[in-house]
Image (cartoon, coloured by chain):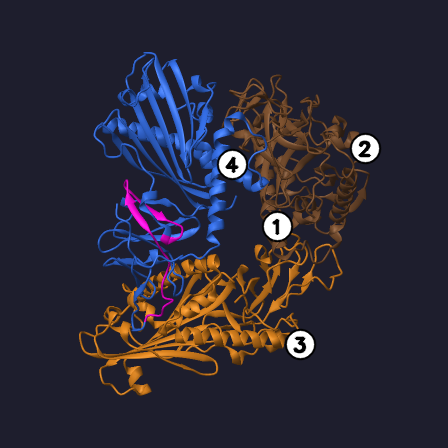
Chain colours: A blue, B brown, C orange
């Protein structure tokens, strides 16, 4: 499948990556430059000066505009050229495409589809972000040189953790427990509870739960087309599963935002919310290291899969029972992409003309 | 020529390369994983888990089986999946291709063609291997990023040694001596004798023969499709050439086993048998270094030829008299490949089902 | 535009690069080997032995011939094989193409077109080279992985210096001055004078002109297809512009010789002639460093443009007023290439048979 769903707010960069200098990143095959306008809000343009196609990101920011390094042409956040040295008339074609942006959750998000359909209401939501009693670990990023479908499958697939992540988050006890898969309009969830069990090695590392019997729940959500949320809950065995009780246990929301760079590579942004070890920087550092090690284990597999897929032209040769949720997710995504492509045959306004950005 | 002869035992790895961990190597364009079964015998499978195409070589060996690192599926030496975690039924398509193997001469050999035609009788033979009075130097390996035909030509071509190997095995005296070329059903041989001559610099390095006059014979055998044997004999000038007399002189059998990795690269295994400086590790180390230097000189040429061939689409523009043996070898190989391709149009059993390996 | 103009003397190498050993360089997509014949004059051959396509540049020079490293075949400066070891008859096809050469201005020039049209009269001319009162800085070379048209445009474009070269040769005062563009049969020139102005930072570095008012002229010549000459003149403000007066001021001729390596890379030779700080090695070293920094700034842009062009299949999306001279230059070149291609349809003698070289 060589297509992308475009009408979506994709995570493009951490806010701190977009500072005084232009920042280049490729999204859905399109080279973008991100920079800050005079009011500090981010702008996203196609990263090519229309004059000689030099990347604007090689230039500099000047009073909320971006100036091409080659001949000094300046562009505003709407992609319009607003200054040409030694030339008074600005040709109408002196512009580059602009994309709507939103800054939220410490990230700059870019709407990669038709600008007139960009709607802040369609922004992904991060649970408990900024709430008292919860700690957020931000800034996670990895470059995964693999098609984003491989990442979706991986994130919808609890089964692999026992093997691939045996030394980190894997729990040997979990390997034989069946998974329940459900779907809604815009997401899939696969979940399982291990009841009256021992805490996982990872649980013990992060919290001194001792050797009490626990119930352990894992919910693998995938919000189409690009967001994974894995919830983990550890409560004393037999606890009634009310929302209040679950929040008294050890609870995490682990988010991953997948943004295709191209058909063969994916930007992997991660953000982690938890209600334990809040305000403990040493615990946070240990947790960050463990998560990054886990994602790096996935990365190695995804790179190898990408190579095999390119060599064989196949994705898989046999499906297993554990593939139910991944298969469902890919089918939903496929239908979304087809529906969008069909609706795109009508008239669109590919260029975002007004340079305004949605407020957060 | 972009084809391979498949019905052959190809050298795949030195025995010591296949230990407790899976070992990956590409042969004839096919990614293979080698590992040891419960009885220690080697197995060779296509290096792709049928589930998500992850290389099995990224996994581990468990009781004579290979376990995929991603979801823990286990395969036996016949390529059959024998265990799927959290799933009782094993789908028939949960298998990967298996290739017959033989372990002999310190090497693991893999039959890359139709499994039902695999026959130990067709194994290459190494002269004097393991016999008293002869020393074997094993373990030689180089990766040559060049088509294997370039290596065949090089190995059938005594003429180049004077120039390319001037500082190692080259003998200036040999450059004008004519070569006799003969062919049999399954090999070509090009040979020449230098009579009543001085020992080559290389001869003097390896044996204190002093300055006596010698007769020096070189036989360049190529056994189609993949084995070169170069015999060198140095005897006192005028010695009658009986087999017994020749073995009393200084005699070597220098073997190279060529295994195409792909159309643009070749695995070069070498093994050297000699009847002098037997049991002398320092002499062996010197000899090994000299041989490796020689092969590295060839390697540089082969890489350059490959580039020129890819750029021009040609192999050569003019043929010389010294090309007789190489041309004959390539023609024989071409006919073998054509005959095999013709016979392949009939029904074949590409998958090796029983997991058995030929005994040595 | 994927074509080259061939009937031209292209700069191929600095004379010092062609010494005792063969020197390899690719020109217009053709791999060449340069070496010196018995009389010291340079020869240029296609860098492939006709036997097995090994680059002749891997071999050695023997008495004014080049010897292939693989089998010792020897070729003279006309590309004829003159010796084959162990073979008396030399086949007629045992030859490689030879190209006419000239050695002048410290460079070896190669005629890449039809040999019978090679004419020393058509050699580029370097002003003041070797004249008293003028100093020459030779030996400049950079490899620019970008199509040569990008370099032509850059060299015909005074406007970019203010921005791209702000820290080296850029002069902020120049950015708004209009440029006059003129053309002749074989060149384009774009020039401008800044009158009654202050010396540029670069001017002050190279000459203690103090803070006097100056007139500053810049002439950007491009001689099709491959030579740029930028003249810079600084004289006291109001000086009458006679040739004698201009030579009394600070004057430079900055030459660049562009030789396409391929469609995606260009050899950039530069040579600088000046009438100030003559015989001052420290000033020359500073000037060389400044020029190289400037060219490296251009290089970064050209690499980025090449990438954008390959990705989009475009060269530019909007033209500016400053593009007049570059556009004119590319059109002239385009017509030259078309005319040459048309004339090539007739009979040509692609091989240079006599091995003679034009004298300088």
In the drawing, does residue B139 fall left or right of residue C226?
right
Q: CA distance from mark 2 to mark 1?
A: 42 Å
Q: Are marks 1 and 3 on the same chain?
A: no
Which residues are drawn in magenta?
Answer: A90-116
Mark 4 lies on a secondary structure that is helix
**At 35% across and 34% down in the image, what residue appears?**
A255
Q: Which mark is residue C346?
A: 3
Q: CA distance from mark 4 to mark 1?
A: 29 Å
**At 77% across and 39% down in the image, what residue appears?**
B345
Q: Are marks 3 and 2 on the same chain?
A: no
Label 1 crowd (10 A; few <14 / some 14-19 / many >=20): many
Q: CA distance from mark 3 to mark 2?
A: 67 Å
Front residue of C220 and C142: C220
Q: Which mark is residue B242?
A: 2
Q: Which mark is residue A305?
A: 4
Residue B166 seen from this side: no
Q: CA distance from mark 1 to mark 3?
A: 34 Å
Tell me, yes or no, whether the highlighted magenta stretch contains residue A254: no
Of circles 3 and 2, the one toward us is 3
């Amino acid at each position: 499948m060589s297509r992308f769903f475009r009408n979506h707010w994709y995570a493009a960069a951490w806010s701190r990556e977009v500072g005084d200098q232009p920042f280049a990143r490729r999204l859905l095959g399109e080279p973008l430059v991100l920079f800050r306008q005079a009011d500090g809000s981010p702008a996203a343009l196609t990263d090519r000066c229309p004059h000689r196609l030099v990347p604007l990101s090689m230039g500099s920011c000047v009073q909320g505009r971006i100036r091409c390094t080659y001949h000094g042409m300046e562009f505003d956040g709407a992609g319009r050229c607003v200054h040409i040295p030694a030339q008074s008339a600005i040709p109408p074609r002196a512009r580059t495409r602009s994309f709507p942006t939103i800054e939220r959750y410490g990230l700059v998000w870019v709407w990669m589809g038709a600008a007139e359909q960009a709607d802040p209401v369609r922004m992904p939501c991060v649970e408990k972000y900024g709430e008292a009693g919860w700690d957020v670990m931000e800034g996670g990023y990895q470059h995964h040189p693999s098609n984003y479908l491989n990442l979706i499958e991986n994130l919808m697939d609890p089964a692999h953790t026992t093997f691939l992540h045996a030394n980190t988050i894997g729990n040997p006890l979990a390997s034989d427990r069946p998974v329940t898969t459900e779907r809604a309009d815009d997401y899939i969830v696969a979940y399982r509870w291990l009841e009256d069990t021992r805490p996982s090695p990872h649980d013990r590392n992060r919290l001194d739960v001792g050797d009490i019997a626990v119930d352990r729940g894992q919910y693998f959500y995938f919000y189409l087309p690009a967001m994974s949320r894995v919830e983990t809950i550890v409560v004393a065995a037999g606890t009634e599963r009310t929302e209040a009780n679950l929040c008294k246990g050890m609870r995490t929301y682990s988010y991953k935002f997948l943004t295709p760079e191209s058909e063969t590579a994916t930007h992997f942004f991660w953000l982690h919310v938890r209600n334990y070890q809040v305000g403990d920087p040493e615990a946070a550092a240990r947790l960050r290291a463990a998560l990054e090690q886990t994602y790096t284990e996935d990365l190695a597999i995804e790179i190898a899969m990408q190579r095999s897929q390119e060599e064989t032209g196949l994705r898989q040769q046999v499906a297993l029972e554990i593939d139910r949720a991944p298969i469902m997710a890919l089918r939903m995504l496929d239908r979304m992409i087809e529906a969008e492509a069909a609706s795109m045959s009508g008239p669109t306004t590919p260029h975002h003309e007004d340079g305004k950005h949605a407020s957060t």
